Structures are given as C-alpha cells and as structure tokens.
Amino acid sequence: MSESPLLTSLRAAVDAAPDDVPLRLHLAQLLLDAGHSQDAITHVAAALQRDPGNAEAQALIARAVAPPAPAVSAPAPAAEVPAQPTASAPASYDWTRAENELSEVIPPRFVQPQQPEPEGEAEPQEPHLPLTVDGSGEDDGSSLWEVETGDVRLADVGGMHEVKERLEAAFLAPMRNPELRKLYGKSLRGGLLMYGPPGCGKTYIARAVAGELGARFMSVSISDVLDMYIGNSERNLRELFETARRNAPCVLFLDEIDALGAKRSQLRNSAMRNTVNQLLTELDGVNGTNEGVFVLAATNHPWDVDTALRRPGRLDRMLLVLPPDAPARESILHHHLKDRPVANIDLAKLAKKTDGFSGADLAHLCESAAERALLDSIRTGRARMIEMSDLLGALGQLRPSTGPWFASARNVAQFANEGGSYDELLAYLKRKKLL
C-alpha cells in the first residue's frame, strides 16, 4: 500500500528541519495512527535525543511499545458488557509498567560521552560543488571531470594519529608555511601512495586533505580513464591533469592505482602499457607544471604497482592506512548508531571487541544489530530499541574482512621488502603477532 501524500510531505519537512521536535513528533503521531510503529519509534527516539524531558515524546514511545488491544469480533449486548474498564482505555493506562518496559529508552543512549565523530570508510558523503575547468563554479558542461569542494577536515577523522602526522609533514605543513617553504626550497610537487586493507577510509582521508588545504578535489578511478579505442585513454589522462592544473591548488585522487598503473612487465596489452607511460609523463609534468597539484593515490595491492610510479617526483612517499584504532572505532560506531533507536550502548566495550575491524566492517555490524532488533520486534509484535545484546550477538557472527589482506601482505613484507618499502607494515605485523 502506498504512503499517503501527507506522510510523504511530513517526511520531507522533517528531513529539511531535523531539529524541529514538534514537527517530528507530529509525524510520529501520524505514523503510529497508520500502524508504522517502527518508523514512529525512530522519530520519537530522535526527538528524545534533542529534548530528553519532552512529555509528548515519552507518551508516544510508551504508546508505540504498548501491546495491542485484543480485537473484538462483534459488539456484545449491553447487558453482557463487563463492569471493569478495559486495559486499553487511556484513563487506566499503567504508566509504571510502561516506564519499566522502557527503562533505558530515555538517555543515556550510550554508556559514556563520545569523542568527536569521524567517518572511517564507511562514512556518509559530503555535498560537493561541481566546478568547471576554470574554477568558476558554473557547470557549463565543458569539462569531462568533476571538480569538487567540501568541508571534510582531518579533525573529522577519528584516531589515525600516525597517518595524520605523515600527511602533515608531506603536504599540510609546507602549504601552511609559504615563507618557510620558500626558504627551504620545498616544492609543492610530488605525490603520496596510500595502501592498506580495503574499507579503512583511504578515500575519506584524501577528501580530508583537500579540505585541510582549502583545495579542490578530483576523484578518478580506472573506469573514468580507460577507453576501448586506442589513444583515448592517454587523451583522458592528459585532460585530467590539465583540469587539475587549471584548478590548482587541487588534490587529485587516483583510486585503484594498481589497475591504472599496473607493472608494465606484466602487461601483454600494448594499449595499457601506453596508458601507464602517459601517467608517468603527466606525473613528471612534461606537458605543464604540476605546482599546486597534490597527487594522492590509493591501492589495496601496492606490490602490483609499477615501480616507476614510486620514483622521486612521482608517488615518492608511501603511507600505510591500517584498520581504525580504538578511538576511531568508537567514533565510527557512534556515527552509525546515533540516528537509530538505541539504548544503553557501551561503545568502549564494543571498540575493544572489534580490534582489526575495518570501517566497513563496523558499519555492517551496526546494520546487522538493527536487523536483529527489527526481526525480534516483528516476531514478538512489540517494537523495541536496539540494545547491547543485539550488537554482541551480531559481533559473534562476524569476522574482520581484513584477514585475507594481511595474509597476502605478510608474504610481501617478509620476502619482497625491497628498499624497506614495507618496513611500516612489517612492524605492524610483528606488533600484532601476525608473523
């Protein structure tokens, strides 16, 4: 059955004004009347988060979790109606029982205060403004590449202090101190290759670097560059770098660089070898200066990247992006739970039990816990909050997705660590006793 136009309009209004508690409660009231108890609980929980003492919200949540009144098949004769009031009569509602049932619905929703949220991998995308190749802000369709701006900063990334320090030294400090950069002859050229297991936030970190620099951001994958016709892939790469130069300062993010810049010795297709050669030419700035163009690349398989890409002046620095540490895991879990109806969640305990989980794994954990609560509500006929037991139950059925990556990386770190490229990875494996 399709939703009424009124509910659809109210949902849109709440999305536009999420802090309007009366409007949200009005929507919850109508959802309850329409029999959508789960949706109603979600909105009431959001209202209680903003106004914990709101009496109307407390009444609505009590109504939502109350058992339904028994159905009456036919009206009974007046003489046979029992004298006692029915359990569903509003005047005789047992508020003490309702409070006992709700217990942890009203804050604290989490056991302890949380640190500022990041967004690891898994994180929601910020809105961006498309720009033309000249940076005017008006999209006239003249560019094949989308140039974005955003408000993501490194402070929005929880934990990962070593990653932030490396980024500060490589890009941010020279950019913020132009006089010292000029004094020491530090160029703004060069690039950095981020590698590590999938789902650990490499793309988000690249966006945060662009926001920290106040620079524009361009994200490119192999599907954006490769073309079935000979010569078009090289032309696409040339236009890509020309667009980045015209929009400098600009962070150019090359995702899946192992596919775009694979080892030429392993390529049988001459067209792909020509594409790698063109990429090397553009990184060298042969066709134009790359001053102010910061090239960040990401890969899950750095051992498959052509070694020529890692020579000085190209992607000459490597940065290992590991699974989120404990503070980052707490922040990621908080981010994925904060808009759900939750009660008495111990984030510190969850963070301790999810060592080795990627940001994507943590998002999946929260989704699985919500699914358990939803199915239990359907089975019992009574909507309830997501509790710690749901998260622990879901955790018992999940394993970190990073395990296979570390199994492959271990062999490379031990037996193919040419020039100490993987010393950082080797130290991590020893610290985690994975060797």
Image (tube, rainbow, N blue to C red):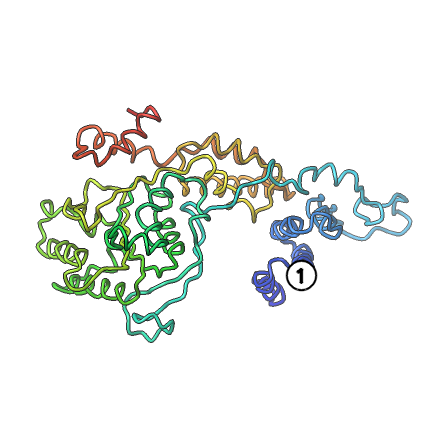
Q: Residue furthest front?
A: 183
| Of residues 50 and 73, the one drawn nearer to the viewer in this rendering | 50
- How many residues crowd mark 1 within 10 Å: few (<14), some (14–19), many (20+)? some
Residue 395, position in %: x, y?
47, 33
Q: Residue furthest bottom?
A: 140
Name which quarter of the figure residue 214 lies in. bottom left
Q: How many labels sit on residues?
A: 1
| Of residues 45 and 9, the one drawn nearer to the viewer in this rendering | 45
Q: Is residue 382 above or below residue 186?
A: above
Picture residue at 74% right of the left edge, 49% below the top: 59
Q: Which residue is mark 1?
A: 23
| Of residues 400 and 84, the one drawn nearer to the viewer in this rendering | 400
- The quarter of the picture where the N terminus appears is bottom right
Residue 406, position in %: x, y?
29, 33
Residue 243, position in %: x, y?
26, 66
Numbered disc 1: secondary structure: helix
Picture residue at 49% right of the left edge, 42% below the top: 331
Q: Is residue 11 left or right of residue 312?
A: right
Task: Specify whether residue 408 is in view.
Answer: no
The residue type indicated by label 1 comes to Leu
Q: Is residue 252 left or right of residue 308?
A: right
Task: Specify whether residue 422 is in view.
Answer: yes
Picture residue at 53% right of the left edge, 39% below the top: 372
